[in-house]
Image: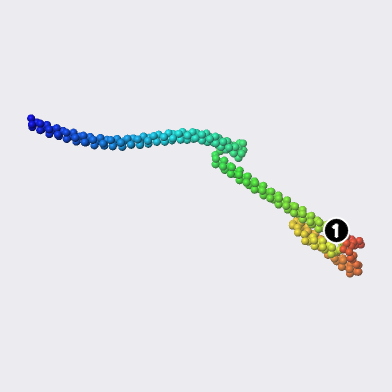
Amino acid sequence: ISALQKGYNQVLCQTLSERNSEITSLKHEGENLRKDNAVTSGMVSSLQKEVSTRDEQIQQLTQEVNQLKSENKEKEHQLEALSSRLEHFRTQIIKATYGQVKPFLDRSITDQQLIEKITQVTEDSINLQQKKWTLQKETQLHSSKREEITENVEKLKTSLDNCQACMKMSRRSKDLKKEVDVLQSLQVSPPVSGLQKAALDILRLALSWLEDTERLLGDVGIQLPSSDAGDWRFFPPIVA
């Protein structure tokens, strides 16, 4: 019995020792599980927050996508309306460029053909405007030249009238020479300058003849009138 008790006590002690070891091990395992649970709870909480945040982002993105879809539909309608207006505008351009009848009845007009035709029409219009501008400038130049000629003719006529009046009233060479000098000093342009030269040639010839006549009359003893406005009634007029 003593031996059995001793063996039982040893078995019991060993069993208690094993149980104590098992309990200690379970305690450690429990602590580890609590730590793991705490970590897992933190991760779950973090994941829940992240999921909640992602849900909000997904909801916001969904709203933005729906808004973009709505805007795209509206822009598609606007684009269709714009395309319709552009097509109408293109048709009007074709009519204005080619006329009412299309040049290609068997096929539509390409954009390249339309651009080339518009370029040609534009160049023709520019050339026409340039020709019109040149014609206007030439007309203005002719008008200005005509006015200048008219003014020169009036000046020449006035000077010739003065010469003629001097020859009719005075018939003195010095008076005629003054008018000839005035006529020579006139600034006139062609073709009036040609008339001026022809008139000067005639008047210089008449002046030379008048001077020779005065010298001849002086040589034969005939006294000339002393007055500048003297009138030689016995002497025939130089110019009718």
Q: Residue at x 29, y 35 (%)?
A: 37
**141 lies above or below 108:** below
- Residue 22, how many percent across, how many down? 20, 34
Residue sitting nearer the eye, 74 or 51: 51
Query: Disc 1 designates what residue?
Result: 165
Quarter of the figure with the C terminus: bottom right
**Colour option used:** rainbow
Q: Residue at x 92, y 62 (%)?
A: 234
Quarter of the figure with the N terminus: top left
* Residue type, label 1: Ala
- Residue 175, how many percent across, how many down? 84, 63
Q: Residue at x 63, y 44 (%)?
A: 125
- State the image quarter where residue 151 is shown: bottom right
Q: Is residue 213 visible?
A: yes
**Image-based side of 217 in relation to 195, left or right:** right
Q: Is residue 205 visible?
A: no
**136 lies above or below 159:** above
**Image-based side of 91 in relation to 188, left or right:** left
Q: Secondary structure at mark 1?
A: helix
**Image-based side of 213 in relation to 108, left or right:** right
**212 lies above or below 52:** below
Residue sitting nearer the eye, 84 or 161: 84
- State the image quarter where residue 13 is shown: top left
Using a 10 Å C-alpha cutoff, classify the residue at mark 1 as few (fewer than 14 neighbours), some (14 to 19) or many (20 or more): some
Q: Residue at x 61, y 45 (%)?
A: 123
- Residue 64, how many percent across, how many down? 46, 35
- State the image quarter where residue 91 is shown: top right
Residue sitting nearer the eye, 162 or 66: 66
- Residue 206, how many percent across, how many down? 84, 62
